[in-house]
Structure formats: structure tokens, C-alpha cells
Image: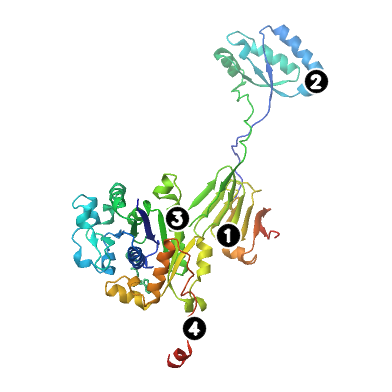
């Protein structure tokens, strides 16, 4: 049985797709057979971030509708043979996702994969609800600002009440906080909430803190998940995040302002 | 505005009811006089209702009965439990026919319930404790609402809305380990965040009604 992980947030543009791509890649690099599914029907961009947009023939909706089978739609990652991508449809609307259809696809994937990572669309509409409904684990992606925290809180309520685990009275979804686009300097000036502030409000376990980083945009522009860029702070932070997801106890990094060394102070 | 000359309002009164178990007038009068002798003050000028349910279908001389009661300074205001003919007779004499209310007293009020919720209440969620108190082991987020007909106890931070005494109980209170609420209300009297902030930022608190207005007190540590 695969572990189904939803990467969700409520608010848009906080880094769900970036995180889904990085975490799925990280899990696969550690040897776990992983598939990452784009639930953002009509606004697909996971395939861009994964650098496989030119290889999309069939998509998630085709599989749900029985127009293609899973093997035809799954795209094998070109960097890691344990990693597969199930892209979203660009042309359908989000109501193409039905509980039965999604449930069937996830059940089929469960037989083959260790991890199924679901990249949720923003909002609390059908697509987001379908992405979280079957989840065992939720990675609540949050930016350190009030409206993002508020939306994450809302999503946590949905995880508790509108998921399969809630409806069937099973053990609740394991909820993790992933703080992204974190900028210690802006926390210091009071422009952003601190890790502690966000944790105090959301009161769930912290899975990781990803710093605001140039490397993210660079990576997605070249279609390479940022976790591959191990020179970068964001790449390293995602690696730590994946390790924690697998149960390792690793201290936080990149949460305090980088102390400028002597040479850096002189040369900028 | 001028007060209307006539106003119609419902009220309920307690009336003494004489249960008439015989149509034999002389016998009835004899019994009546006996009762009057026992407690004359109780009966003089008292409005009385006659209950005919034991003599349903039998003929009784109501006019005569009314007259003899009037002689004894008793005021007959109505009959109840009368059959059709007895009702007609009462009507022609200008006596009201009264429907008997339910004899059994009101059922005792249901025991007050206490609803305990052991989780954080998230934005968009609403919890209502109907007919009782609400206890939350956790925080109430911004955008969440907790409501109770009784009191609300929050063992965590109240950031959202809390409404106690939702169906009018003035004695309800709201207690929170940390008060940082968007709104608190008791029996419809409410305070917004800005009113609460005057109390001092983010300490524990007990909110209750003092007459018409809310007061908040910090809890002892
Ligand atoms: N750690 C980061 N540092 C800098 N930029 C970032 C970081 N994470 C994400 N971004 C940028 O933020 C933007 C939104 O990211 P992404 O598409 O992953 O968000 P999303 O939550 O999936 O958005 P949507 O809700 O639209 O699906 C992108 O331009 C991405 O490059
Ligand atoms: Mg996205």
C-alpha cells in the first residue's frame, strides 16, 4: 500500500507545485518508487516544473474517463527511474475529477508505488477537495504571512472534516507544516511572521522551512526540480524535509539570518 | 407615540374548578354550602369554573345553579368538560365554555449537557453546544466560531468568535486561557476585538454579563 501525500495550502502561489516536485524527486532519489500527480486541472504546470511538458500524451482525466490506461499516461522521469509523473489536463475543467474516478486511479497506483504525491490546486473547490480526500499525510504549504496562515488553517479544518479518513472515522490524516519562501531578514524587520509565530497559530508538526531563494525560479525555468540543485539553500532545505518525512530527526537550517563572513562583508 | 386604546394580549390565570358529579340540585347545594362553611373567605367573589365531565349526557338546570351561586356571592365564569347540550345552555346564559388545559405539569427541563471537543477549531469551522456548555481542549482559530446555549470554556487561545448564552441565558460566561478574540458575545451582548483590546493584550479571561454590559476579568494564574 502506498502512502498518499497531499501538498495543499488553500492560498495560491505559495509553492505547492515547487514542493510537490521537490519532495517527490527527493523520495525517489532515496530509492522509493514515487508518482507525483497534478490535480490542477486546466492550469497544469507540474509537468513544466518537472521538465516533461513535451512528453505529455495522455493525462489524469483521460485515465479517469477510461480513454487511456495508467501505463500510457504515466511519464517516467528522465533523471530518476523511481519517479513517475501523472500530468493534469490542460483542456478539461476541474469537475472532470470525481471521487470514484480519483479513488480508482489512486487504488491502482497504490499497488505499484510506495508514495503518491498529490499536487493540489489552490482554493477549496472540487480539485483541492479531491486532492486531499484520499490522503494519509498532508503537507500544508504555508508562506510566513497572515493570509496564507489563515488559509492553511482553513484547509486543516477540511482535512479534519471532509477527508475519507474523517468520513470513515479512521485515524486522522497526519498533518505537517511546510513553511516556504522564508526570509529571516524580513522576519527580523517584522514584515513576515516567524517560524514560531506560524507554529503557534497552526499547532501542527513542522516538516521543514524552505528559504526564499533565487534557485527556485532558476530551477523551474529550466524544468529541473530545485532539490536536484544541491548547491542551493532551497535544494538542501528540501532534502532535509524529505528526510524528516521519512522519519529522520534533523535540525532546522536557513531559519536565521546568514552571518556575513569577513570577506563577504568587505566584498559584498 | 400614543398608546393604542385597545391592546390584545394573551395571559393565563389560575381558576378554581368545582367538579360536578351529580345532577341532583338540592344535593349539590348542600355540598356547596358545606364547602363554603369550611373556607368562606376563599370562595366569596371568587371566579369559579364548573366541570361537567362526570355528568356528560345528563340534563342539569344550569340557570338555577348559576342563580344559587350568585346568591352565595360566587361568580360563575365558565363551564368545562360540558357536552353539546350543556354547552348550548351555557352559551344562552352568557357563560363561557373553557377548554381544559393539559392537566399534567410541564416536564422537568432536560438536564444540561456539556459538549467537550478535544481539538483545535479551525478557520471556517463552527461548533454549537445546543442546550448546554461547550468545553474546547485546544485553540479556536481566526475565522472559527464556537457557540453554546450555556457557557464556553476554552483551554487554549480564543482567536475567533465565541457566543455564549446563545438562546438568551444571561448567566452564561466565556472563559479562555488566552483571549485574542474577533468577537465575544453573551446573550446577544457583544464585544469586538477593539473592545477587548482595552482589557489588555492576550491574557486569560472570564467574560460575563454585568447587568446590560459585558465585563472581563483576568483569571488567577
Ligand atoms: N522558496 C522559494 N523561493 C523563491 N520563489 C519561490 C519559492 N517557492 C516558490 N517560489 C515561486 O513562487 C511561485 C509559485 O510557486 P508554485 O507554482 O510552486 O506555487 P503553487 O502553490 O503551486 O501555486 P498555485 O496555487 O498557482 O498552484 C513560482 O514563481 C515559484 O518559482
Ligand atoms: Mg501549483
Camera-side mark, 1 or 4: 4
- Mark 2: which secondary structure? helix
Residue at mark 1 to residue at mark 2: CA–CA distance: 67 Å
Q: Which mark is residue A174?
A: 3
In what element is the residue under mark 1? strand
User: What residue would you read off at disc 4?
Assistant: A259
Kindly report the distance in space between the C-alpha atoms of the residues bearing marks 1 and 3. 22 Å
Which of A239/B163 is in front?
A239
- Can see residue B189? no
Q: Which chain letter goes with mark 2? A: B
Q: Chain of mark 4?
A: A
Determine crowd level at label 2: few under 14, some 14-19, many 20+ residues with C-alpha closer than 10 A: few
Q: Quadrant of the C terminus of chain B?
A: bottom right
Residue at x 33%, y 66% (from the top left corner): A29
Labels 3 and 2 in the same subunit: no
The image position of residue A78, as x and y in percent, is 24, 67
Q: Which disc, if any, is residue B61?
A: none
Amino acid at each position: 500500500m502506498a502512502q498518499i501525500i497531499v501538498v495543499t495550502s488553500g492560498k495560491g502561489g505559495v509553492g505547492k507545485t515547487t514542493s510537490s516536485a521537490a519532495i517527490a524527486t527527493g523520495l525517489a532519489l532515496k530509492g522509493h518508487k514515487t508518482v507525483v500527480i497534478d490535480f490542477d486541472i486546466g492550469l497544469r504546470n507540474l509537468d513544466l516544473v518537472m521538465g516533461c511538458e513535451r512528453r505529455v500524451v495522455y493525462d489524469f482525466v483521460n485515465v479517469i474517463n477510461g480513454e487511456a490506461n495508467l501505463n500510457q499516461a504515466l511519464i517516467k522521469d528522465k533523471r530518476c527511474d523511481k519517479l513517475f509523473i501523472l500530468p493534469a489536463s490542460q483542456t478539461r475543467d476541474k469537475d472532470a475529477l470525481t471521487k470514484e474516478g480519483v479513488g480508482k486511479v489512486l487504488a491502482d497506483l497504490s499497488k505499484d508505488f510506495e508514495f503518491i504525491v498529490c499536487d493540489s490546486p489552490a482554493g477549496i473547490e472540487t480539485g483541492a477537495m479531491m486532492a486531499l480526500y484520499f490522503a494519509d499525510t498532508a503537507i500544508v504549504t504555508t508562506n510566513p504571512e497572515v493570509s496564507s496562515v489563515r488559509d492553511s488553517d482553513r484547509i486543516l479544518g477540511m482535512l479534519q472534516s471532509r477527508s475519507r479518513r474523517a468520513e470513515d472515522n479512521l485515524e486522522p490524516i497526519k498533518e505537517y507544516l511546510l513553511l516556504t519562501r522564508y526570509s529571516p531578514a524580513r522576519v527580523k524587520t517584522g514584515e513576515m511572521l516567524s517560524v514560531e509565530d506560524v507554529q503557534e497559530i497552526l499547532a501542527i508538526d513542522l516538516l521543514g522551512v524552505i528559504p526564499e531563494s533565487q534557485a527556485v525560479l532558476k530551477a523551474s525555468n529550466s524544468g529541473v526540480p530545485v532539490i536536484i540543485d544541491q548547491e542551493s539553500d532551497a535544494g538542501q532545505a528540501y532534502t532535509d524535509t524529505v528526510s524528516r518525512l521519512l522519519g529522520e530527526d534533523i535540525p532546522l537550517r536557513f531559519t536565521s539570518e546568514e552571518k556575513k563572513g569577513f570577506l563577504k562583508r568587505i566584498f559584498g | 407615540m400614543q398608546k393604542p386604546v385597545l391592546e390584545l394580549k394573551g395571559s393565563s390565570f389560575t381558576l378554581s374548578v368545582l367538579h360536578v358529579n351529580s345532577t341532583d340540585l338540592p344535593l349539590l347545594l348542600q355540598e356547596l354550602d358545606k364547602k363554603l362553611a369550611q373556607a368562606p373567605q376563599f370562595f366569596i367573589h371568587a371566579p369559579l369554573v364548573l366541570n361537567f365531565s362526570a355528568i356528560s349526557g345528563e340534563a342539569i338546570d344550569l340557570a338555577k345553579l348559576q342563580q344559587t351561586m350568585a346568591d352565595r356571592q360566587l361568580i360563575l365564569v365558565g363551564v368545562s368538560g360540558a357536552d353539546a347540550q350543556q354547552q348550548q345552555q351555557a352559551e344562552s346564559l352568557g357563560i363561557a365554555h373553557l377548554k381544559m388545559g393539559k392537566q399534567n405539569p410541564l416536564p422537568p427541563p432536560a438536564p444540561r449537557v456539556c459538549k467537550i471537543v478535544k481539538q483545535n477549531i479551525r478557520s471556517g469551522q463552527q461548533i454549537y453546544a445546543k442546550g448546554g456548555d461547550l468545553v474546547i481542549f485546544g485553540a479556536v482559530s481566526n475565522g472559527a466560531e464556537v457557540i453554546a446555549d450555556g457557557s464556553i470554556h476554552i483551554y487554549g487561545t480564543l482567536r475567533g468568535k465565541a457566543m455564549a448564552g446563545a438562546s438568551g441565558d444571561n448567566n452564561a460566561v466565556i472563559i479562555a486561557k488566552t483571549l485574542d478574540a474577533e468577537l465575544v458575545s453573551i446573550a446577544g451582548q457583544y464585544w469586538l476585538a477593539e473592545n477587548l483590546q482595552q482589557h489588555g493584550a492576550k491574557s486569560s479571561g472570564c467574560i460575563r454579563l454585568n447587568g446590560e454590559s459585558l465585563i472581563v476579568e483576568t483569571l488567577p494564574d
